[in-house]
């Protein structure tokens, strides 16, 4: 049955950090998949879930925002080539996981009707999208670019509730203790790891 919990802080490397659409119902898949259910006035409980499978659809955030009749704009804070730490190089299949391999890195804050909604911190294997650094992410999104230039065929997701890092809080214009959803996603193409 449900287990009473206290507030928790999870830490995973973030790809996307954003404001949850419903702060009272947060999905956490960090360790053993539980749903946090508020119960007033007794407390918050975690209910264990059985294995859940579903079809994953990757949608472009710009398209999602526009489909709601809202305006999307992006602020690009970083778009450059970097030397990857060994763990990142290994995850991206770069030069046999060698430390110092070249990786593309972008940090973009997406806004919906002027409100910062999502902080997207993305690393890309240069072999998958050689033109990534030349893209204008004010007029397109990394997701849209990757849809157009690669054959995405598999993804791994982790979704959790977490407090933002100080940089994420600053970029999103929220408090250091405001709740966020952290989505860590790793996508694969047919042509590269």
Image (cartoon, rainbow, N blue to C red):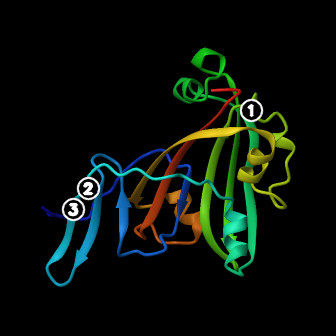
Question: Mark 2 and mark 1 in contact (Cβ < 8 Å)?
Answer: no
> Going from the N terminus, do you reach mark 1 or mark 2 first?
2
Q: Position of residue 135 (x, y in %)?
A: 85, 48
The C terminus - image quarter: top right
Q: Residues within 10 Å of mark 1 (few under 14, many from 20)?
A: some
Q: CA distance from mark 3 to mark 1?
A: 40 Å
Specify the quadrant of the image occupied by residue 108.
Answer: bottom right
Q: Residue at x 46, y 62 (%)?
A: 181
Q: Would you name the residue on which mark 1 appears?
A: 128
- Numbered label attached to residue 49: 2
- Numbered label attached to residue 103: none
Is 28 rendered above or below residue 176?
Answer: above
Question: Mark 3 and mark 2 in contact (Cβ < 8 Å)?
Answer: yes
The N terminus - image quarter: bottom left
Q: CA distance from mark 1 to mark 2?
A: 36 Å
Q: Residue at x 70, y 80 (%)?
A: 113
- Numbered label attached to residue 47: 3
Q: Residues within 10 Å of mark 3 (few under 14, many from 20)?
A: some
The local secondary structure at tag 3 comes to strand
> Going from the N terminus, do you reach mark 3 or mark 1 first?
3
The local secondary structure at tag 2 comes to loop
Is 121 rendered above or below residue 66?
Answer: above
Is 121 rendered above or below residue 114?
Answer: above
Is 36 rendered above or below residue 13?
Answer: below
Question: Mark 1 and mark 3 in contact (Cβ < 8 Å)?
Answer: no
């Amino acid at each position: 049955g449900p287990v009473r919990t206290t507030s928790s802080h999870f830490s995973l490397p973030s790809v996307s950090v954003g404001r949850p659409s419903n702060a009272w119902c947060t999905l956490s898949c960090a360790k053993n998949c539980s749903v946090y259910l508020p119960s007033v006035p007794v407390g918050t409980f975690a209910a264990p879930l059985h294995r859940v499978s579903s079809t994953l659809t990757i949608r472009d955030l710009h398209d999602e925002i526009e489909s709601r009749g809202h305006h999307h704009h992006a602020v690009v804070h970083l778009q450059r080539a970097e030397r990857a730490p060994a763990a990142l190089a290994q995850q991206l299949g770069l030069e046999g996981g060698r430390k110092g391999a070249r990786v593309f890195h972008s940090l973009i804050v997406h806004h919906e009707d002027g409100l910062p909604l999502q902080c997207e911190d993305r690393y890309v294997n240069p072999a998958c999208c050689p033109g990534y650094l030349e893209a204008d992410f004010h007029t397109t999104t990394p997701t849209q670019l990757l849809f157009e230039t690669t054959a995405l065929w598999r993804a791994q997701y982790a979704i959790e509730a977490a407090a933002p890092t100080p940089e994420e809080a600053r970029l999103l214009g929220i408090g250091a203790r405001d709740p966020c959803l952290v989505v860590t996603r790793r996508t694969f193409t047919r042509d590269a790891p």
